[in-house]
Amino acid sequence: MAKKPRIVIIGAGMAGLTAANKLYTSTSSHDLFELVVVEGGDRIGGRINTSEFCGDRIEMGATWIHGIGGSPVHQIAREIHALDSDQPWECMDGFPDEPTTIAEGGFELNASIVDPISTLFKNLMDFAQGKLAPDGGAASKGCTSNGGFGNPSVGAFLRQGLDAYWDSCEDRGEFSGYGKWSRKLLEEAIFAMHENTQRTYTAAGDLFNLDFEAEREYRMFPGEEITISKGYLSVIQHLASVLPPGVIQLGRKVTTIEWQPEIHKSKDITNGCDSSSRPVKIHFCDGSVMLADHVIVTVSLGVLKAGTGQDSGMFKPPLPSFKTEAISRLGYGVVNKLFLQWSPNGNGRNANDKDKFPSLQTVFHPPESELRHEKIPWWMRRTASLCPIYNNSSVLLSWFAGKEALELETLSDEEIVNGVSATVSGLSSALKPHKEVKHNSPEFCNWSAGEVRFVKVLKTKWGSDPLFLGSYSYVAVGSSGADLDTMAEPVPKTGSSELDHGVNHPLQILFAGEATHRTHYSTTHGAYFSGLREANRLLQHYHCLGVYN
Ligand SMILES: Cc1cc2nc3c(=O)[nH]c(=O)nc-3n(C[C@H](O)[C@H](O)[C@H](O)COP(=O)(O)OP(=O)(O)OC[C@H]3O[C@@H](n4cnc5c(N)ncnc54)[C@H](O)[C@@H]3O)c2cc1C
Ligand SMILES: *[C@@H]1O[C@H](CO)[C@@H](O)[C@H](O)[C@H]1NC(C)=O
Ligand SMILES: *[C@@H]1O[C@H](CO)[C@@H](O)[C@H](O)[C@H]1NC(C)=O
Ligand SMILES: *[C@@H]1O[C@H](CO)[C@@H](O)[C@H](O)[C@H]1NC(C)=O
Ligand SMILES: *[C@@H]1O[C@H](CO)[C@@H](O)[C@H](O)[C@H]1NC(C)=O
Ligand SMILES: *[C@@H]1O[C@H](CO)[C@@H](O)[C@H](O)[C@H]1NC(C)=O
């Protein structure tokens, strides 16, 4: 009797564990395949890593369910009651509803200056994402120009929109002034703050490298965006829980995947299950090897880029050029989170619930401006917010993207504390109690006196971690949605048509992972769908051959 086909899944993140879960639970006897999940790290979850900081549950990686309507991640979280918790968790209150906008120099900005720019930015993004019809939205867009088509990048489109706004809105009302800020500079800086948020959403460190046409292909689920009370990892653990012990092997970093691209005329074309010679040979970093009939590769696009670049041979022979070109064209960026515990009095906890740190939106002079506060380091200047992770938590969170995110990874805790403290002082120094301070945290006025202390730091390091080499993918200028589809194609190509019967060992290498989903890339549910897709591809393959039913 032929040996059971052996399927090796590389990576125990969302995509890999979804595929394993599906393959295992779909085979009624649990016994049609030999299934192994090999993970280079010492934990499951990949870019999902729930952790704890100062007693609060936090997420080092994936944080939000981006729309609960139709999200498979939400469905699982609900079914396993992961959405109920008595303990506080990151963003339990959702997004901060009324952030205080502070401009460098210490100005709390009036809504009258912030809101029009925020609305402009939102309309421009809605338009870029295809949520506003080309002219249907014009009326509601006020001063927004409708240009946009033909723009190579989201960045160029946004700046064109800002220019059109300035051209068409000469009369923007009174501007009583904020120190040396001119109205135009301030508007531009507020706009840049929103661009910086967009950089963290997309992982495009430079929005001029984010493809404009592809932006409208991206899909969000409708409904609320929420975080998972019991932690994102609870979803991962649920997926893994059906697998028998031994299926998931940790600390098994793959170095090379040897496969057989040759197309032979098979003498025995109907017997696709003959695995007497397993075609794929997987090499691990400890020198061991494993043979497989099928490998599902779920490593990040960053790991694939590094593994398929010049002088690197993750695949032997190298993947065909249609694969390597898509891998190299698509974008993959770094986004990091910084958690800081603050204390109004240095003792590491909130003295009382009046000591709330406000949710801050931060507006900076551009790095080259002579008006800039020289103590604020460059890597803080594109940080759009500094907010408590919930209501009155003593833990603050900022997001970083691009080269600022990479720089953050290299800094010591002390350098970070100094940089953030200098930033908070630079932002708050002119805020005095006699000035119009609307928010409910008069203590903020005193922080410049050095009363706020950052006592503990936790940062993520997704960019330099060799198992990730970044955070998530985006469609870069020069690539397109079609490249995401190409990412998903197995090699050698499918064995379901007449022509393919010439392939002795079809579907040796399959690809899943966030970067292989055309419309939901960069997300956990995109990774989930991709894992399901590749599991189904294999199930279908064996079903067609009459082995699986
Ligand atoms: C900071 C941050 C915030 C995010 N926020 C959100 C969010 O709010 N909402 C959302 O939906 N998504 C978010 N994401 C994206 C989401 O986390 C990912 O899209 C998703 O988890 C990717 O899953 P995956 O299975 O494709 O890849 P991964 O999780 O990367 O899994 C791949 C696995 O392969 C392993 N591996 C790598 N190389 C090797 C090797 N050579 N040998 C063996 N194993 C290897 C890795 O260790 C990893 O476990 C965020 C990501 C980051 C980093
Ligand atoms: C995952 O979280 C743990 C703490 O819970 C931390 O030690 C580890 O560095 C994190 N890994 C990544 C890749 O974020
Ligand atoms: C803020 O708005 C109020 C009216 O809402 C106005 O009186 C005040 O001058 C504004 N401040 C600045 C700095 O524009
Ligand atoms: C937020 O804080 C207010 C008072 O500061 C409190 O009434 C409210 O219940 C808090 N919300 C949550 C979700 O903790
Ligand atoms: C938040 O405030 C509530 C009361 O409003 C208090 O019971 C709780 O301890 C506070 N939490 C933190 C982390 O300070
Ligand atoms: C600022 O601090 C001083 C001294 O600690 C205190 O008396 C004052 O009330 C504080 N101001 C505000 C607005 O909290």
Image (cartoon, helix red, strand yellow):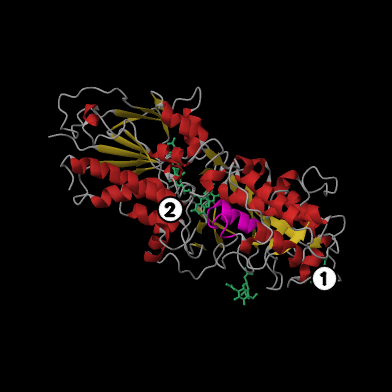
Residue 24 lies in the magenta stretch:
no
Name the quadrant where ligand 5 sits.
bottom right
Q: Is residue 337 visible?
A: no
In the foreground, 481 or 470: 481
Numbered range of the magenta stretch: 121-137
N-term-proximal mark, 2 vs 1: 1
Give, as a three-letter code, the residue at label 2.
Answer: His
Q: Secondary structure at mark 1?
A: loop
Q: Is residue 486 left or right of residue 339?
A: left
> According to the image, label 2 marks what residue?
525
Q: Are marks 2 and 1 in contact (CB under 8 Å)?
A: no
Q: Residue furthest left?
A: 1
Task: Say left or right for 232 vs 547.
Answer: right
Q: Which mark is residue 436?
A: 1
Q: Is residue 21 above or below residue 347?
A: above
Q: Would residue 463 be seen by someone viewing this image from the given angle?
A: yes
Q: Nearer the viewer, residue 249 or 303?
A: 303
Q: Is mark 2 within 8 Å of ligand 1?
A: yes
Q: Residue at x 62, y 64 (%)?
A: 140
- Using the image as rendered, state which of residue 273 and residue 193 is in the foreground: 193
Question: Could you say where residue 539 lies in the image, as x and y percent from the top left?
Answer: 25, 44
Q: Nearer the viewer, residue 291 or 199?
A: 199
What numbered label is drawn on residue 16? none
